[in-house]
Image: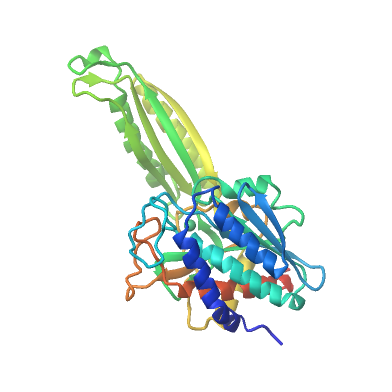
Amino acid sequence: MPIDFYAEAEKLFPYTLKLRRDFHMHPELGFEEVRTAGIVAGELNELGIEVTTGVGKTGVVGIIEGRAPGPVVLLRFDMDALPIHEETGAAYASQTPGVMHACGHDGHTAVGLSVAKILHKHRDQFSGTAKLVFQPAEEGLGGAREMVKDGVLTNPKPDFSIGMHVWNDQLVGKIAATAGPMMAASEMFSVTISGKGAHGASPHLGKDPILAASQIITALQSVVSRNVDPLETAVISVTAINGGTAFNVIPPEVSLKGTIRTYLPEIREMVLRRVDEIIRGIAESMQCTAEIKIEDVTPAVINDPRLAELINGIRNEILPETEDLSGLRTMGSEDMAYLMDDIPGCYIFVGSKNEEKNLVYGHHHPKFDFDEQALMQGVALVSASAVAVLNGAVE
Ligand code: NI
């Protein structure tokens, strides 16, 4: 008998909710998810699933073997919270001052454990291996990279990977599995512009790094408008500028920080090159020098078109009340990209905003909360997609 994934997710919904709200009340920052990881490992152990803990510091991996050898599908769920003081006033609000699940990763962990239950129960109905990955420290701390270093992409090596995120930018009931680029590659840069300090009344005796920095900031905006193909996209944002303390002193140094977001590798390379040229060129022409540090944060999340098509078809079949929002892309970034590098993968946005319930605040806002219906949809869609892939729906 085919598995009724919607009915299974619905039946498990009280379990999903209970877990989500418990995680929400007890949020933990990246690489500190000790309690969360303990619950994850405990729940998986109770099912009799093979569990490895301490993968990428606080990460947990569970392996579910199907009835026969076959493909390996990695399913990824992140677990970390943010250093934000919660202001939702929810009954299940954070009990830890200054720490909050303001991105929905509490929900993702609950979805992961619910998916584990469904896959474990129906393990005689698929071939291959489901590798459930509970990842720490997604919020800019490099949790996925740590898990990769600890061998999460080996033994067994995944053939496919699937991940999901509740998405408060979109209404609950709208689901996106966009083929191709979906989230951007992210770089952070920091620049120190050095000149020569002087009295504010004698600028001719100094080399003003503030004037150089101002021109650099303005000129950086020409990269996207003049160098990037207008039909492609990129973002350069200068997000910090620091220099000087007194009204009558030209400081010797100014520092800048910012982020660069791109989809395509060739655009990324060109943007990085132009950023470097502009900063150095202007600094030099203004008699200053520039020290530039550019660090890559994550590659782009690029969905495999075959997987995206499969998942959209499954969504239509098992969640007919939902709307296909494929085509949705964002310049946000996600370290899920490391778990999809060289592995065909698909990352899914599950809309979770609900205006009637005033669940309208964006991710990382102190009042962020989402419609938990999205979790049930996530459980049904991720488990159904995993089973389809394990049964050879994508060659
Ligand atoms: Ni997130």
Regarding residue 115, the answer to whether it shows in the image is yes
- In this view, the residue in front, 341 or 81, is 81
Among the 4 quarters of the image, the one containing residue 132 = bottom right
Whether residue 286 sits left or right of residue 298 in the image: it is left
| Most foreground residue, 188 or 69 | 69
Examine the rendered structure and indicate whether residue 181 appears above or below residue 326.
Answer: above
Residue at 50% across, 46% down = 140
- Residue 85: image x %, image y %? 36, 53
Using the image, determine if residue 182 lies above or below residue 48: above
Residue 202: where, in percent of width, then height?
20, 14
Question: Quarter holding the C terminus?
Answer: bottom right
Quadrant hosting residue 50: bottom right
Q: Residue at x 34, y 67 (%)?
A: 360
Q: Residue furthest right?
A: 68
Q: Where's residue 188, x and y in %?
A: 46, 40
102 shown above or below 5: above
Give above or below for 303 relative to 380: above
Q: Foreground: 271 or 126?
A: 126
Residue at the farthest bottom position: 1
Q: Is residue 202 left or right of residue 302?
A: left
Count of residue discs: 0
Give the quadrant of the N terminus.
bottom right
Is residue 75 visible in the rendered image? The answer is: no
Q: Where residue 247 sits: x, y (%)? A: 19, 24
Q: How is the image coloured?
A: rainbow
